[in-house]
């Protein structure tokens, strides 16, 4: 008997110790050589995470980190080696069709459309497969096409669409059945900046904000993830190395701190005092209209910062400006996924 959705829990998705591997070789000869037991390469290692209802959840990682593999398993397109996936309370591994009815998937795979059919005909076909028919389907097609700004291209063959238009049509298809859970795999890839911003606004403000849908977004765009997502899971080589709201990832960031100090005068003695401060890793100077600009990188320490301010203000130098450089998403992301000798 299939699972029924658990409306009382606050989680739309619960993943527990998910493992996925792929054969390292294919074909009859490797099968014969290894007596039917071809070696496999594990690409996801015991993934566990939870996505709340009405949350915009981001999957962020470098190429090959496992984002698309994880997304396909969540969408019931791939079966895990072990572990469990619950979608709206349903065991998606044991009852994939029941889970699939709650899912809308937006991928960047253009070949999933029929090139000779128009956008309208493609949506009519896929909408029918999703169980939407007749007047309801026609009404829904008008609504989703308006949302992605393809009204003027409705009756043009898909083969004549640009890459950005094709991507927007995949978003429209994902919305046809009005599912409570949506998966987006790099939805703004190949989309022009104007329509990319409109898609982001639609995902954040309309789908999540107004309609209360749960959205899982796989992206390589750091600013997109930091701006849109309520929670971000950072994947590295098949493992979740960090998970939480963007501001919590900022808080946990413990790399070197960067400061920019502007002084009215600069001499060799000041430079020597600054470079002698423990924890200093960068000291660069330049001249601007403000004065002498010092770009400094130093290990997090209240004592080091005190020593720095004392060093630059000694011998009569006046500090005209003191700025702390904000931690950038790229700095946090690079620190989290940095490959070390132990990762090889």
Image: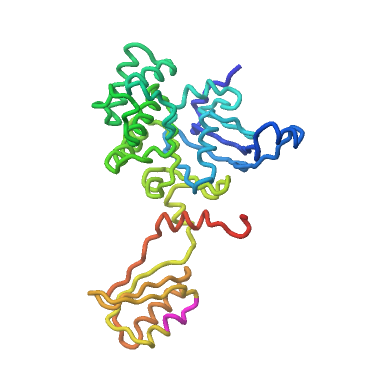
Residue 282 placement (x, y as % from top left):
43, 73
Query: Does residue 335 show up magenta in the picture?
Result: no
Camera-nearest residue between 197 and 262:
197
Residue 91 placement (x, y as % from top left):
58, 26
Residue 208 placement (x, y as % from top left):
37, 34
Residue 260 as seen in the image, left or right of residue 80:
left
Which residue reaches farthest front?
Answer: 29
- 169 lies above or below 24: above
Which residue reaches farthest top?
Answer: 134
Q: Is residue 181 visible?
A: no
Camera-nearest residue between 153 and 201:
153
In the image, what residue occupies the spot 42% across and 85% down? 272
- Image colouring: rainbow
Instruction: Locate the N terminus by quadrant.
Output: top right
Q: Is residue 324 visible?
A: yes
Residue 1 as seen in the image, left or right of residue 135:
right
Instruction: Locate the C terminus by quadrant.
Output: bottom right
- 295 lies above or below 164: below
In the image, what residue occupies the spot 33% across and 14% down? 136
* Numbered label tally: 0
Camera-nearest residue between 322 and 343:
343
Residue 318 placement (x, y as % from top left):
29, 81
Camera-nearest residue between 185 and 291:
185
Residue range in magenta is: 273-278
């Amino acid at each position: 008997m299939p699972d029924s959705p658990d409306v009382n829990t606050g989680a739309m998705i619960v993943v527990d110790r998910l493992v996925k591997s792929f054969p390292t070789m294919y074909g009859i000869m490797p099968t014969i050589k290894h007596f039917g037991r071809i070696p496999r390469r594990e690409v996801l290692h015991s993934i566990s995470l939870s996505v709340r209802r009405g949350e915009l959840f981001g999957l962020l990682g470098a190429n090959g980190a496992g984002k698309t593999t994880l997304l396909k398993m969540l969408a019931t397109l791939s079966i895990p080696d072990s572990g469990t996936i619950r979608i709206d309370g349903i065991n998606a591994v044991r009852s994939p069709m029941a889970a699939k009815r709650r899912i809308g998937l937006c991928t960047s795979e253009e070949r999933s459309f029929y090139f000779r059919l128009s956008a309208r005909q493609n949506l009519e076909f896929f909408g029918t497969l999703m169980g939407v028919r007749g007047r309801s389907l026609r009404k829904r097609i008008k609504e989703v096409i308006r949302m992605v700004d393809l009204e003027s291209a409705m009756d043009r063959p898909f083969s004549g669409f640009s890459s950005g238009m094709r991507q927007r049509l995949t978003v429209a298809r994902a919305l046809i059945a009005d599912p409570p859970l949506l998966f987006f795999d790099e939805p703004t890839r190949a989309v022009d900046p104007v329509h990319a911003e409109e898609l982001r606004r639609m995902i954040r403000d309309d789908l999540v904000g107004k309609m209360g849908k749960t959205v899982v977004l796989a992206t390589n765009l750091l600013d997109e993830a930091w701006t849109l997502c309520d929670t971000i899971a950072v994947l590295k080589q098949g493992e979740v190395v960090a998970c939480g709201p963007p501001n919590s990832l900022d808080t946990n960031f413990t790399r070197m701190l960067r400061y920019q100090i502007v002084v009215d005068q600069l001499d060799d003695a000041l430079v020597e005092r600054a470079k002698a401060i423990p924890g200093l890793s960068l000291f660069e100077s330049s001249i601007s209209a403000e004065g002498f600009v010092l770009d400094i990188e130093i290990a997090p320490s209240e004592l080091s910062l005190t020593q720095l301010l004392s060093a630059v203000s000694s011998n009569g130098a006046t500090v005209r400006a003191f700025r702390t450089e904000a931690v950038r998403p790229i700095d946090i992301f690079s620190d989290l996924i940095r490959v070390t000798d132990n990762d090889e």
